[in-house]
Amino acid sequence: MYRMLVTIDTSQIPSPTFSPIVRKNITSRSVRRCPVADPPWLTSLLNNGCNMQLADVLVQAGRHFADRVNQDAFAPGSTDRQIATAMAWTIISLISPTVTSGRVVVEDPIDGDIKRLCSEILGVGMSLEVLRKNRVIDGRTIRKIAAGFDFDAIERGGGGRVLIEAKGTFRDASTSEHRTSIYNKIINQGLPRGYGRAIGVIASLWTASDVRDFDLEICDPEEPAESHFEEAVREIIRFYARRFEEAVAMQEGVELLFHAAGSPDLFDKSKPSPLPEATLKRQRLIDPLRHNSLRLNRAGVVQEFWGRIWEARKLPIPLPFEKRNEAIPLQAFIGIDSAIFRFIRDRDFRSLLDYETSDEGLWEAREETFSAVFQVDSYGVVTGVYEGSLPTNVNATENADRGR
């Protein structure tokens, strides 16, 4: 049988940051306007906007496919999450997105089917990412659901579970229809009105010659729900165990996290620590949570990352590496901020829920014995590639020209 291998290069995703134009639902029907005062996050978003990156948007867009990835259709070595992101990029590349003057600009494919497909996929990514970036939801708890709404996630800090409906359109063509759909879903489920348990977001795509009205419209969410603090804690611990899929996980460390997440004593402070392995012991030959460590200084932000949970050799890391010395093999480093383990060990779950770190930019370090480039996501996971001998302490500088 004829076999064809196709490489999808996600490093070609445009890297500059952009700031979408955001507005509230401007429907002329008063019954469909949100009847409560704007929460602080929405006021800030409307007044100040937010910076986003297409690479992060496409990770969120890939959630459309992540649960249905057929590994048999792809060459071995990639995780479901990577494949899903690559699929989203393959589709979105049909409209050749670029970032110009701080805005996302696309080409008109003319074909209506392509417009609808790309609008839907990019609409999902933009919607989820703007809610994550503005701390409305905890990105570690996003789930795709099939119960009326597209997705749900837990509010930052372990509050209520938020239902999310994400829509996309091209040149504002179907915004009115999307508003009607979102309104009907809220009403049909008997949800009260306000900003806490259901949020609709409509994303519109524009070409360079269009007069742009908006990029994102926030539609009629509703009021707060009961607390999901304990559920959120367990879900976030499992998130770190599953971050790069089981295929690249080191079994012992991952099992420790799963065991902690499922422990009936997780919140009982009278019982032993749920993760005592987060305390390093010199007499221990192998630490199940730390094989090696990296103390990374990013412009004064110093974090110690532990590498052990995932086998870096099995995980492709598509980071650009300039001035490459082809005679020296590239190596990979993947690690978790050790503070995450400490929060679980000490039952400091409020800090675990509130944790976030800067996720913007690529960080480079070059010295006589090594060269490296790193990227840190907002959840405290660092990925990096390097040549030479990587020291424990690394001072990195941001590459503003190629930051993502």
Image (cartoon, helix red, strand yellow):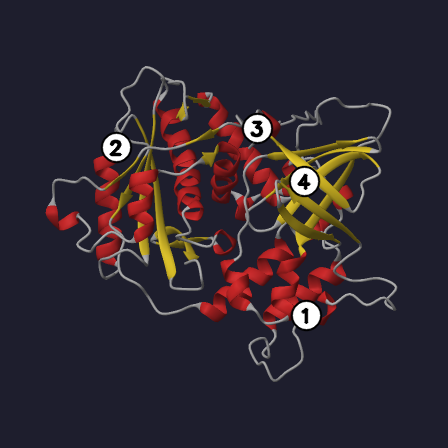
Looking at the picture, tell me which residue is in the foreground, 189 or 358.
Answer: 358
Tell me which label, 3 or 2, sits earlier in the chain. 2
Choose top left, top right, bottom left or bottom right for residue 297: top right
The residue under label 3 is 400
Label 2 sits on residue: 174
Q: Amino acid at mark 2?
A: Ser
Q: Amino acid under label 4?
A: Ser
- Disc sitting over residue 275 in the figure: 1
Question: Which label belongs to residue 72?
Answer: none
Q: Secondary structure at mark 1?
A: loop
Q: In 3D space, how far apart are the residues under numbered discs 2 and 1 (Cα atoms)?
A: 50 Å
Q: Secondary structure at mark 2?
A: loop
Marks 3 and 1 sit apart, C-alpha to C-alpha, by: 38 Å
Separation of marks 3 and 2 at Cα, in angstroms: 37 Å
| Residue drawn at the location 34% of the way across and 50% of the way down | 41
Mark 3, Cα crowd under 10 Å, few <14 / some 14-19 / many 20+, is few
* Residue 244 shows in this picture: no
Task: Please tell me which residue lies in front, 32 or 214.
Answer: 214
Crowding around mark 1 (Cα neighbors within 10 Å: few <14, some 14 to 19, many 20+) is: many
Q: Amino acid at mark 3?
A: Ala
Question: Mark 3 vs mark 1: which is more N-terminal?
Answer: 1
Q: Earlier in the sequence, mark 4 or mark 2?
A: 4
Total marks placed: 4
Circle 3 or circle 1, nearest the eye: 3
User: Which of marks 1 and 2 precedes in the sequence?
Assistant: 2
Among all residues in the image, which is located at the extreme bottom?
270
Structural distance between the alpha carbons of marks 4 and 3? 28 Å
